[in-house]
Amino acid sequence: MRGNIFGTALLLGLALAAPLPALAQQENLGRNVDSLLDYAKARNPEYAAMRLEAEAARERIYPAGALPDPVFRTELQNITNYGSDASPNILPSRVGRTKYTLIQPLPFWGKRELKREAAEAEAEVAQARAGVTWTEQAARIKAAYAQYFAVAQLIRLNQEVIDLIDRIERITQARYAGGLAPQQDAIRVMVERTAMKNELIQMETEHHHTRSRLNALLARPTESPLAAPELLRTVPPAARLDFVALENRLRDRNPQLFADTARIRAAEKNRDLSYRNRYPDFSVGISPMQTGSRVNEWELMLEFNIPLQQESRRSQEREAEKMADAARARKEATANQLLDELSANLAAIDASRRIEMLAKSSLLPQSELTFQAALSGYETGKVDFATLLDAQRQIRKARQDIVKAQAEQQARLADIERLIGEDL
């Protein structure tokens, strides 16, 4: 009895403990972008479909280079048994003679290898397309998370500003009660607070939209909960964002360029195959001849097609040449477009970095000093209320500029990593 109770308790404990890692992952989902990327890589249906298509393309390699199936043929000769007393029949042992033929088609030397190599290149194209799908999906997730983080920060800043306005309102009410401030100041501070609350509602709505967007990218229900974002990724220093170094990494690792390179290789193999089609394909066969119930004769057969339609083949060869040239031109166009995007993103990340530094080192400290001076001046009646509100708005704008610059850097960083095909 005691053993049964212990066994039941053990099974119950294992059952309760089993989903804990999954639950922990769900609770941490959204705290940082890495958790979102890991989740998406394991569950995103679009990426899974591209991976499966790449695996399917790999399975086409062996059949492309395999020999064609042999052909078996049976010929019943003189089924009327002409010249004998036997009646017509279709049994092999009761007709005049039966011929069995086994034929094996044989492509000309080198054709099977070219077909297999072309299939390998097409499989690499499919694999590269899967890589393109993931890099694009990862970039969208990174950018959406940056926006998710930025909106959360802006909501926090907005609430801090509302608290500050409440403080200003108390000062205004005290001055108004003492006859030191006009009623207009008290009304204006209430209007300002109402405007900030209206802005807060809009930010909360945007926060909902960014969360829904992230859930959609993760293939989750749009209303699924996400943890509050805690931190952004570190943006590499300017020395690591060198255009020449990143250009080399882009050319070596970008999945779109890898796909274009594989397409060039496939087009070149198809071109070589079209030239090899100038030569005939063969078929060899062996035929035992049955008379009555005995096989008493054997035949060998050699067959090949005669490539007479040379003009048709020349057209196919020219087509294959043009397709190879088109694949090379497409790769060059893709490289130029990607390098242009890389240059634009590097310039944008540099600009947003400078905006952030300027706001942190100059604009925000100056705005805070201005506000403190305006607040002291307003309390003593040396500064009017409009100056105080302007100083408060400058602080809010400086903090918002910092948050937006950080989000812009993250979005641009995601684009750069998409272009070079790996994380920096």
Image (spheres, helix red, strand yellow):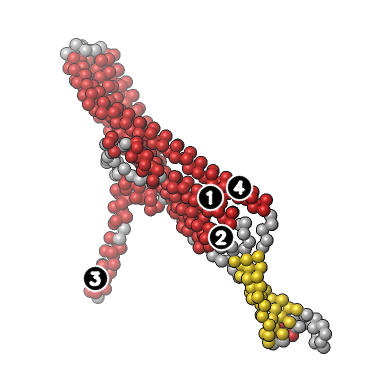
Q: What crowding class fits label 1: few (fewer than 14 Cα within 10 Å), some (14-19), or many (20 or more)?
A: many
Position above or below: 191 against 153:
above
Are the residues flagged by discs 2 and 1 in contact, CB closer than 8 Å? no
Tell whether 126 sits left or right of 154: right
Q: Which residue is mark 4?
A: 318
Q: Nearer the viewer, residue 57 or 150?
A: 57
Camera-side mark, 3 or 2 = 2
Q: Describe the element under mark 4 as helix, strand or loop.
A: helix
* Residue 267's disc number: 1
Q: Is residue 67 visible?
A: yes
The tag earlier along the polypeptide, 3 or 1, is 3
The tag earlier along the polypeptide, 3 or 2, is 3
* Residue 111's disc number: 2
Instruction: Using the numbered discs, state the Cα–Cα distance from disc 2 to disc 1 in whole angstroms.
Output: 15 Å
Task: Give the position of the C terminus as an image quadrant.
Answer: top left
The tag earlier along the polypeptide, 2 or 1, is 2
Instruction: Using the numbered discs, state the Cα–Cα distance from disc 2 to disc 4 in whole angstroms.
Output: 18 Å
Q: What crowding class fits label 2: few (fewer than 14 Cα within 10 Å), some (14-19), or many (20 or more)?
A: many
Q: Nearer the viewer, residue 307 or 139?
A: 307
